[in-house]
Image (spheres, helix red, strand yellow):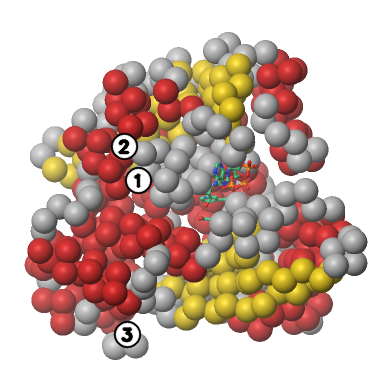
Amino acid sequence: MAPNGDPELERFVTEVARRNPGEPEFLQAVREVAHDVLPLVADRQAYRDARILERLAEPDRAISFRVAWVDDANAVRIQRGYRIQSCNAIGAYKGGLRFHPSVNPSILKFLGFEQTFKNALTTLPMGGAKGGSDFDPRGKSDGEVMRFCQAFMSELFRHIGPNTDVPAGDIGVGAREIGFLFGQYRRLANEFTGTFTGKGLAYGGSLVRTEATGFGCVYFAREMLGTRGDEIRGKTCLVSGSGNVAQHTAEKLIELGAKVVTLSDSDGFVHDPAGLDAERLAFVIDLKTRQRGRIREYVEKWGGTFHAGERPWKVPCDLAFPCATQNEIDAESARQLVANGCRLVAEGANMPSSLEAIGVFRANRLLFAPAKAANAGGVAVSGLEQSQNAMRLAWTREEVDQRLLEIMQKIHARCVEFGREGDEVDYLRGANRGGFVKVADAMLAQGVL
Ligand code: NDP
Ligand code: 2IT
């Protein structure tokens, strides 16, 4: 998947690179989609004439703003806030906010670009966006996080709204941050609407939204295994990360009878050969969401080993679920996974596999569930939260979970439809083409904008 000599692809990517210097993550995401979509565009004159792919590679709007706030020592701090509104051809902009020191325009543009296709795959009417800040919530007091969130929303609020742009969480933006952000939005806009998803249950949140990305990822993996007459039960699984997505991926895997032997954070990974159970997972969830501790503390309580500065991919497994961050699986890790007998990789995180790693998975015919399909359950339940808010009612846990399952099954079916190659399915191609066609047809119908 690295430069592969296809002149059309290279021409396209070179032009996007020229317009977006110094943005490697954005270019990586564009190359990955263009690789699969350009042959389809070549077959459809209308897509070519309307320059659909070129237009999608340019966000509708990229907003950047100063966020000044005062820390506990009374020092003034300055951060940068962003909202990238990528495409609203099929619905109001929708996508998470990320608070992490690494946040920059390249990362948010890749995430917004991916979100456009992911949201199209959910079958719900949602456009693509992403935003966030280089603010690091780690080590900050609740008061500092609140003041930062209020300062951030003081600018963002004018760009969002229930029919305009609906943010949610992502890395570093969980229940606490969403509460503070929504509170400030409600105050400034003087309205109580579903302008945020991932809200607390007390103020308009949906049941199962917290679990949705992880649960959806495992539902998708189960569908894939089903096509080969296989199942989750009894499989040894690697999960990376230990935040929202990792926690609930592990939860569903354990519930379905798999053995989860790793979790990680940016300090390293824990390996528990005995496998996590409900009690150990409850410890991790409390450690990460309430105590805001480090994953190495798991080993002090439950045993196993901690591997500082390393990622879990060298541990032998049947199934791998990267749920931390972009480019956490490089070519060497991919080869290690293959050599150790891994059969399936399902991306809970966004773009966790490098292009070279994807090349290794493709060459070895692994079941590879790309992020825009596998982790779409989170934004799908965000869409269901918007529906419930608009109706001013709340569905039961069973109802939301059943709808999530059905959406993941529909995404799987669309990947199969668009990715079938003889007896095999290229899920990445299926997801890229399946998402693209919906957005492209909506853009065609609406003229040149
Ligand atoms: P959280 O903030 O809850 O957890 C993030 C986890 O990833 C933490 O364990 C964190 O470790 C680790 N991590 C973050 N950055 C890095 C890094 N640069 N290197 C190594 N580890 C890192 O975020 P989420 O669980 O919500 O998000 C995880 C991934 O899932 C992201 O790619 C996100 O875009 C994606 N995603 C999230 C959805 C959601 O609904 N929340 C929906 C779809 C995708 P540490 O604590 O040390 O930083
Ligand atoms: O990457 C993602 O899909 C998310 N962070 C969730 C977005 C959302 O609007 O729920």
Type of amino acid under label 2: Ala
Q: Secondary structure at mark 1?
A: loop
**Quarter of the rendering containing residue 82:** bottom right
**Residue 446: which disc?**
3
The x and y percentages for residue 390 are 63, 70
Q: Secondary structure at mark 2?
A: helix
Type of amino acid under label 1: Ser
Q: Quadrant of the C terminus?
A: bottom left
The x and y percentages for residue 249 are 54, 35
Q: Residue furthest bottom?
A: 448
Whether residues under marks 2 and 1 lie with C-beta atoms below 8 angstroms apart, the answer is: yes
CA neighbours of label 1 inside 10 A, class few (<14), some (14 to 19), many (20+): many
In the depicted structure, whether residue 2 falls above or below residue 322: below
**Quarter of the rendering containing residue 273:** top right
Seen from the viewer's position, the closer of residues 342 and 327 is 327
Query: Is any part of residue 409 visible from this angle?
Result: no
Query: Is any part of residue 28 visible from this angle?
Result: yes
**Mark 3 or 1 closer to N-term?**
1
Whether residues under marks 3 and 1 lie with C-beta atoms below 8 angstroms apart, the answer is: no
Which residue is painted at 40% across and 58% down in the image? 25
The x and y percentages for residue 329 are 40, 38
The residue where tag 2 is placed is 331
In the depicted structure, whether residue 52 falls above or below residue 13: below
In the depicted structure, whether residue 445 falls above or below residue 348: below
**Mark 2 or 1 closer to N-term?**
2
The residue where tag 1 is placed is 354
Label 1 beta carbon less than 8 Å to ligand 1: no
Which residue is painted at 23% across and 69% down in the image? 14
Which residue is painted at 32% across and 77% down in the image? 19
